[in-house]
Amino acid sequence: MQLHIAVKNAFPQHEEAVDGICCEVLIGVTTHFEDKGWEVEAGNGLLFDSAIIQLTGQLFNNTQTFHSNVKKAVMKTLLFDYELYPLSSAGNEEAQIKFVKDKADELLRTSVYLCGKPDALGKSSNFTHPAIQNACPSLYYSSTASKSLCQFVKFQNYIPYKALMLVVAIIHTVLSTLCKHSSEVTSNLIAEDVECAYRGLEGQVDHILGNPYHGPKLDRMLEEWAASRMTGYTTKTGGITKTSHNEFNVILD
């Protein structure tokens, strides 16, 4: 289910998901158990149907759990990477709160939160900010996570665009929270806010991919990030939200 959220549909609708992907996951698990010769309790009648409904519901709830896991990965370095710690010279608590709010607002307003250092030709590097680079590969290619992208042949050579967008959308949501509340980033994510940010990024990724310079550059970056995390791992075979800011604007210079 986490793989589905990361690379296919980050925001499944409840009824559609429960009757669709959740059932597919359960069937896949059952088939895997049967192939291994492990016992699967079939049950019968209404009791079995009730268990299936409960399990599919639990799988759907995994959507929010995974979004929270992404946030945890993001928060490990976000405040440091974006220099959101107020300086001691900022003054009293009120001044420090204002510093954090203003800094977060500037990062979003200018889209600086998206960009790393310019490349050797002096061109912008979208989606390469250290906060993104630190969170994205470590989240999806953890050597200790049994369901990381390392486990799937299809994703061992590159990080999918949608997986990248989910990380950036949650970074955007955290920064937006800091703009409003300064330090209240420990509260639960609001799914609607994350989805709004995600939709705002979709069109921008399309703009990048359609650019003859920045499109291949993004692809190379995602391949390099995956390769860096695959080191030492045995490879298996087998529409934009309107805003008065520039929060989602990539730079195609």
Image (cartoon, rainbow, N blue to C red):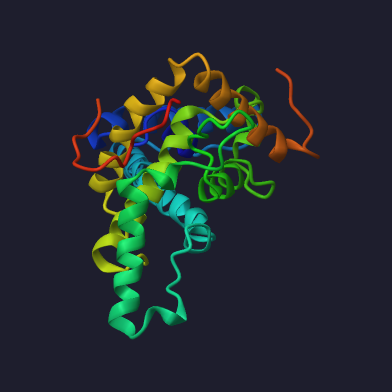
132 or 25: which is nearer to us?
Answer: 132
Answer yes or no: is residue 42 visible.
Answer: no
**Quadrant location, the C terminus:** top left
Q: 245 above or below 251?
A: below
Percent coordinates x, y for residue 191 in the rendering: 27, 47
Q: Is residue 156 visible?
A: yes
In the image, is 23 to the left or to the right of 212? left
Q: Which of the 4 quarters of the picture holds residue 187?
A: bottom left
Among all residues in the image, which is located at the extreme front? Answer: 122
Corner quadrant of residue 111: top left
- Does 110 sit left or right of 139 as displayed? left
**Foreground residue among 87 and 143:** 87
When asked about the image quadrant of residue 178, the answer is bottom left
Query: Does residue 95 sit above or below 219 in this rendering?
Result: below
Looking at the image, the residue that sits furthest to the bottom is 92
Residue at 49% x, 37% y: name it. 127
Image height check: is 96 above or below 235? below
User: Residue 175, how many percent across, how many down?
Assistant: 35, 56
Please tell me which residue lies in front, 100 or 66: 100
Q: Looking at the figure, which quarter contains the N terminus?
A: top left
Point out residue 147 in the picture as x, y percentages from the top left corner. Answer: 58, 41
Report x, y in % for residue 82.
Answer: 47, 58
Relative side of 136 to 153, left or right: left
Total marks shown come to 0
